[in-house]
Image (spheres, rainbow, N blue to C red):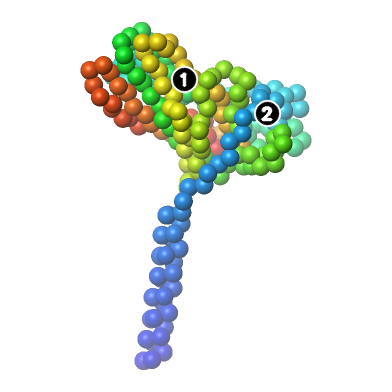
């Protein structure tokens, strides 16, 4: 009887340990990813000729009460150099377009969440370990302020946010920003979050599903 009770106690202890471990993994804090401003020379990391031929996907949505459009461009390209075989580059860009809207209205994007397994670190310039690059010598004017990895998602925060003021802006977009993975690309769901404000209404938040190329 004593041995049986001891066996039950040990089983309960083991179950509690497993439960605690699962709970700890669920509650694990998000990992902050390092951001690095780069030039288009980043593509030399993938191709000896410093040129890539990306496959691009484009997804867009328009709110019902504003004549504006949010476009998510995502693209991927394989590594071709001897040191780049087996890796893929993934890049993203958000663009807000005014489709004839006037007045004092605002369309704002605060964040982009993509389904992305653990980003691979890479060396570039004087930095030995990078995780996110931002191509600042190309088109665009807004860069992510931070990126956090949790579970299988990477969330890019824009601080300040990407804002289209319909009274003055025709279009505004982010720089291209990207990451590396050893997994091949496919289309998955991304989430664009933000808010819109018309002259007649207060801020209305949104979370919009869009397609994106991810590992």
Residue 95, label in figure: 1
Q: How many marks?
A: 2
Judged from the image, the secondary structure of the residue bearing numbered disc 1 is strand
Q: Quadrant of residue 1?
A: bottom left
Q: Please tell me whether residue 122 is drawn above or below residue 102 in the rendered image.
A: below
Residue at the image position 69 percent from the left and 38 percent from the top? 127
Q: Residues within 10 Å of mark 1 (few under 14, many from 20)?
A: some
Residue at the image position 70 percent from the left and 35 percent from the top? 124
Residue at the image position 41 percent from the left and 59 percent from the top? 23
Q: Is residue 47 or residue 137 the one in the foreground?
A: 137
Q: Position of residue 68 (x, y in %)?
A: 36, 15
Q: Position of residue 188 (x, y in %)?
A: 46, 34
- In the rendered image, the residue lying farthest to the left is 200
Q: Quadrant of residue 45?
A: top right
Report whether residue 57 is seen: no
Q: Residues within 10 Å of mark 2 (few under 14, many from 20)?
A: some
Q: Position of residue 183 (x, y in %)?
A: 59, 40
29 horizontally vs 200: left or right: right
161 horizontally vs 135: left or right: left
Q: Is residue 189 or residue 194 the one in the foreground?
A: 194
Q: Position of residue 147 (x, y in %)?
A: 51, 38
Judged from the image, the secondary structure of the residue bearing numbered disc 2 is helix
Residue at the image position 41 percent from the left and 75 percent from the top? 13
Residue 33, label in figure: none
Q: Quadrant of the C terminus?
A: top right
Report whether residue 126 is seen: yes
Q: Quadrant of residue 96?
A: top left
The mark that comes first in sequence, 2 or 1, is: 2
Do residues under tags 2 and 1 come within 8 Å of each other at their CB atoms?
Answer: no
The residue identified by callout 2 is 42
């Amino acid at each position: 009887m004593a041995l049986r009770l001891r066996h039950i106690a040990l089983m309960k202890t083991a179950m509690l340990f497993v439960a605690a471990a699962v709970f700890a993994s669920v509650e694990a804090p998000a990992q902050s990813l390092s951001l690095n401003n780069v030039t288009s020379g980043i593509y030399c990391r993938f191709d000896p000729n410093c040129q890539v031929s990306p496959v691009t996907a484009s997804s867009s949505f328009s709110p019902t009460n504003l004549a504006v459009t949010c476009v998510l461009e995502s693209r991927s390209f394989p590594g071709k150099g001897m040191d780049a075989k087996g890796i893929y580059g993934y890049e993203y860009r958000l663009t807000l377009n005014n489709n004839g809207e006037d007045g004092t209205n605002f369309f704002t994007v605060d964040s982009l969440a993509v389904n992305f397994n653990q980003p691979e670190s890479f060396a570039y310039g004087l930095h030995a370990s990078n995780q996110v690059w931002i191509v600042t010598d190309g088109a665009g004017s807004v860069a992510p302020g931070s990126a956090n990895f949790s579970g299988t998602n990477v969330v890019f925060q824009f601080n300040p946010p990407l804002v289209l003021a319909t009274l003055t802006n025709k279009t505004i977009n982010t720089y291209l920003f990207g990451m590396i993975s050893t997994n091949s690309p496919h289309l998955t769901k991304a989430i664009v979050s933000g808010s819109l404000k018309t002259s007649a209404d207060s801020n209305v938040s949104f979370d919009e599903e869009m397609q994106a190329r991810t590992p």
